[in-house]
Amino acid sequence: MVKLIDVTLRDGQQSLIATRLSTDDIIRVAELLDKAGFYALEVWGGATFDAALRFLNEDPWTRLKRIREVVKRTKLLMLLRGMNLVGYKHYPQDVVKKFIEYAYKDGIDIFRVFDALNDLDNLELPIKVTRDLGAELQVCLVYSVSPVHTIEYYIKLAHDIIARFEPETITIKDMAGLLTPYVAMELIKELKRLGVKVNVHTHSTCGLAPMTLLKSIEAGADFVDVTLSSLSLYMSHTPAESLIAALKGTKYDPGVSLETLYTASKVLWEIRKKYRGYDYALNAPPIDITVLKHQIPGGMLSNLMA
């Protein structure tokens, strides 16, 4: 069985509507997602923090507390940019420590930690604090394609991460949607030989994501990231409902309720209509194959457009 992590309320909305969902709208969807049977919901971190402050006049800490109040069955996950936390510069060590402590206290169960350049030194303190708190840890391999970023590079990086941090899970973080199905299979098989759980995070920008996730699951991925269908594809992610239907009755069946997601997706589609001013995907081709050249991450592209 593969476990599904829903990223609708963080990366999904960041990728398609420039992170503009209000807390009230997030709560409406979170209550439904909590009933579906996901392993975790990614709801915080990334641009959700500064967008709430800059554009929505909302307190991101209040948002997290409100989500925790209504999500009773499912783990909450946040994306943490290493020493950058949820910002765009390195913060002092005492700030990093207190930020993670309060995020954990206010409801985060899983910290997905990455450094954009795969610099492990910048993960040292955030990982130590996460471990000391007893929270669940995911350490990211930030995926790209270049003469440097080869399978060999990522296998060596995985060895270094495991030797240094002994994480429960390594996440292949493919922000631009460049990971192809057979490269994913090769990489995951190598990671599984190292005895670590593997999560796959990839965007649908150029249309590869659903194929890549299916092959990732067949290769042994323990978790994959999805979004509700009404906030999926283009710069976002693989639609949860489609993947669940494809896996139904197989040994990979994640056991997530399609009926619950039908309701949640319908509610979210009505909510999405309120954000047409930021919803560039509605007026764009369904895929952007040029991402294979420009490599701009999905969550960054929608915000650049805005």
Image (cartoon, grey):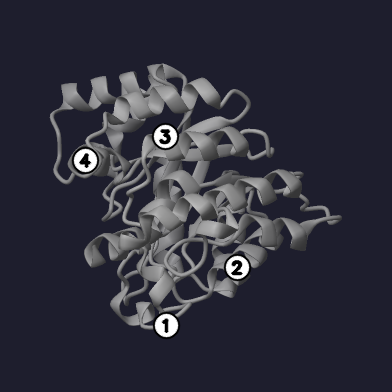
Q: Amino acid at mark 4?
A: Asn
Choose between 24 and 163: the one closer to the eye.
Answer: 24
Which-is-in-front pick, marks 2 and 3? 3
Q: Which residue lies at the image location 36% right of the left edge and 67% below the top edge?
A: 144
Q: Amino acid at mark 2?
A: Pro
Q: Which mark is residue 30?
A: none
* Residue 168 in sight here: no
Which-is-in-front pick, marks 1 and 4? 1
Mark 4 crowd level (few <14, some 14–19, many ≥20, 10 Å Cα) = some
Q: Could you tell me how far apart the alpha carbons at marks 2 and 3 are, in whole angstroms?
A: 30 Å
Choose between 13 and 22: the one closer to the eye.
Answer: 22
Q: Is residue 236 rendered to the left or right of residue 55?
A: right
Residues at marks 3 and 1 touching, judged by CB atoms closer than 8 Å = no
Q: Which residue is disc 4 drawn over?
A: 84
Q: Could you tell me how far apart the alpha carbons at marks 4 and 3 are, in whole angstroms?
A: 27 Å
Q: Which residue is disc 2 drawn over?
A: 210
Looking at the rendered structure, the secondary structure element under dot 4 is helix
Q: For the C terminus, give its image quadrant.
A: bottom left
Percent position of residue 186, x then y: 58, 67
Q: Is residue 114 rendered to the left or right of residue 43?
A: left
> Reading the chain from its start, which is encountered first: label 4 or label 3?
3
Q: Which residue is disc 1 drawn over?
A: 289
Q: Which residue is disc 3 drawn over?
A: 24
Q: Is residue 68 rendered to the left or right of residue 129?
A: right
Q: Could you tell me how far apart the alpha carbons at marks 1 and 4 are, in whole angstroms?
A: 30 Å
Which-is-in-front pick, marks 4 and 2? 2
Mark 1 crowd level (few <14, some 14–19, many ≥20, 10 Å Cα) = some
Q: Is residue 100 above or below residue 150?
A: above
